[in-house]
Each structure stands twice: as structure tokens, then as C-alpha cells.
Image (cartoon, helix red, strand yellow):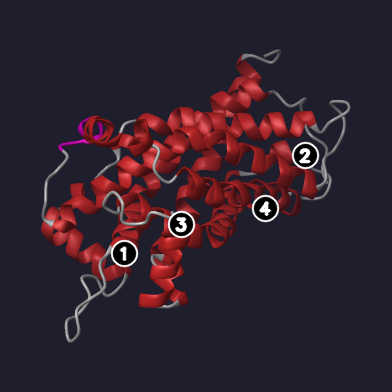
Amino acid sequence: MADEPKPISPLKNLLAGGFGGMCLVFVGHPLDTIKVRLQTQPPSLPGQPPMYSGTFDCFRKTLVREGITGLYRGMAAPIIGVTPMFAVCFFGFGLGKKLQQKSPEDVLSYPQIFAAGMLSGIFTTGIMTPGERIKCLLQIQASSGETKYTGALDCAKKLYQESGIRGIYKGTVLTLMRDVPASGMYFMTYEWLKNILTPEGKSVSELSVPRILVAGGIAGIFNWAVAIPPDVLKSRFQTAPPGKYPNGFRDVLRELIRNEGVTSLYKGFNAVMIRAFPANAACFLGFEVAMKFLNWATPNL
């Protein structure tokens, strides 16, 4: 593995990660809306076609019925939460790497990078869970024909009035089950690809923009290959009426497999994979650009 160009700074990871997360949301939110609607659509009645036959059908119907703004439904919640969320994510990753170094010159192995990535998934859950809960409810609201929430803040307020803080944090365990292993895979794959794509005799810090985009995009695909089954369970659980799944994800899993088969755990797979490459390429490019700026502007931070 290539040497780290500079000592790890969790604070710089915090700042650069927030900017990278904003880039990810702007690029990836439309297909995230499609993913959630596919994951949460009700089973079709006998003899009736499903609400959406697939990714492109959902995309087309959303555009026709709601226009381009329909694809950005619920984006306020992730935008409000994304800067601190990704900031904390990259901070956790930087901290996880630093904790495993005995000296700043130590080069971490890929299992150590995986462990640091898993720590980042634990760090983000407190911010991620309420944002995901609100986003999913707003994304499915338009397709259901009801208008219970006027926006992200109204949704948060009503959830708190109905169920207290537990209502806002519904799905925390499933968010952990999704993000801890997926974050480990995400960061390990990105670091591995950066090293593979670095020309011989060059430093990782000199990697070109196209190669950063490729590494970030493929890392996003590996991340979601791990994350999508618990993400399906999370989306179902977070958008279900209160009391529907008293035993949590076990009830969701049992119902999904009984009614729709094992393949239902990969609902929204096409939308996720189409979204994963450009969104995560934008995220890591934003992170690297911000990190280079911070290294230039504040070399001793």
C-alpha cells in the first residue's frame, strides 16, 4: 500500500466529509427517491399490475405525475443532515485510522481500514436514523395520494407529537445493521482502488480526477451490494404504521420472505446501482478537493 501523504487529521476529515456529502445528495437524491418508492410499494392485488414495474417505470411515472421536483421529494431532510452526517462519517473513519496507528508513518492494512470504516458507520447512526425516517416518509407520501406532512420539519414535529423521540429514531438497529458493515466495505474498497489506480512512482495524493471518480464510484457500488438487504428492511420498517412490526426487523423479514420471496430483499437494486456510481464518485471527489484545499489553507490543522 502507498504511504499516507500526510498525518491523519480527523478534523480535516470532518470538514472535507461534510462537503463530499453535499455533493453526494445533489447527484444521488433522484434515484434514492425511486429506490424508496420501489422498496415500499404495496404488493399488487391478484390480476392487477404493480404500482411500478421497475426502476424506469417508477422514474417515468414520477416525472409525469409530479415533474422534476418529485424526484427531489424529501431532499430537505438529507440536505439538513448531510453535512454533519458525512462530516461525522469521515471524522469517524479518520479517527478509526488514527487509533490504529502507533506512529503517523504507520501504513494500515486493508482489514484495519475496514475496521475504521465500521467505526464511521457507528458514528453516523445517531444523525442518519431520523434523517432516513423523515426522508422515507416524505418520499412515499406523494405516491400514496395522501398529504400528511408539508415538509421535513412538519414531519419531525408530528412524529415527535405521536411517538416522542422513539418515533423519530424508529429503525435505529436496522440503520446500524446496514451502515456498519457497508461503511467498512465502502472505505476499504476506496482505499484499495486508489492504490491500484495510482501509477507506479506516483503518490496517491497525485491521483487524477477521473481515477478518483472511478475509485469513488466503484466503492459506492460495493457499499450498496452489502447494504441493500438491511436497507429494504429499514425502509419498510420506518414507513410502516405504528405497531405493525412489534418484533422489529424479524417481523419485517418474515413478512417480506413469506409474501414476496427472498428476492424482495433486493427491491430497488437497479435504482441503487445506477445511483451508486455517480453519487459516490461525486462524494469522494468533493472530499478529495476539500481535503486538498484544507491541506493548502491550513497545513498545521
Q: Which amino acid does label 3 sit on?
A: Phe
- As drawn, is 164 to the left or to the right of 122? left
User: Could you tell which of marks 1 and 4 lies nearer the N-terminus?
Assistant: 1
Q: Which amino acid does label 4 sit on?
A: Thr
Q: How far from the left and from the top, in percent, is residue 172?
A: 47, 43
Q: How far from the left and from the top, in percent, is residue 217?
A: 54, 53
**Residue 292 falls in which quadrant of the image?**
top right
Identify the mark at residue 189; answer none if there is no mark: 4
User: Could you tell which of marks 3 and 4 lies nearer the N-terminus?
Assistant: 4
**Residue 127 visible in the current orientation:** yes
Residue identified by numbered label 2: 203
- Mark 3 vs mark 2: give the one in front: 3
Q: Which amino acid does label 1 sit on?
A: Leu
Residue in the image at 31% along x and 64% along y: 38
Q: Distance between the residues labelled 1 and 4?
A: 27 Å
Q: Do the residues labelled 3 and 4 touch (CB within 8 Å)?
A: no
- At mark 1, the secondary structure is helix
- As drawn, is 152 to the left or to the right of 187? left
Q: Distance between the residues labelled 3 and 2?
A: 45 Å
Residue identified by numbered label 1: 38
Q: Distance between the residues labelled 3 and 4?
A: 28 Å
**Residue 78 falls in which quadrant of the image?**
top left
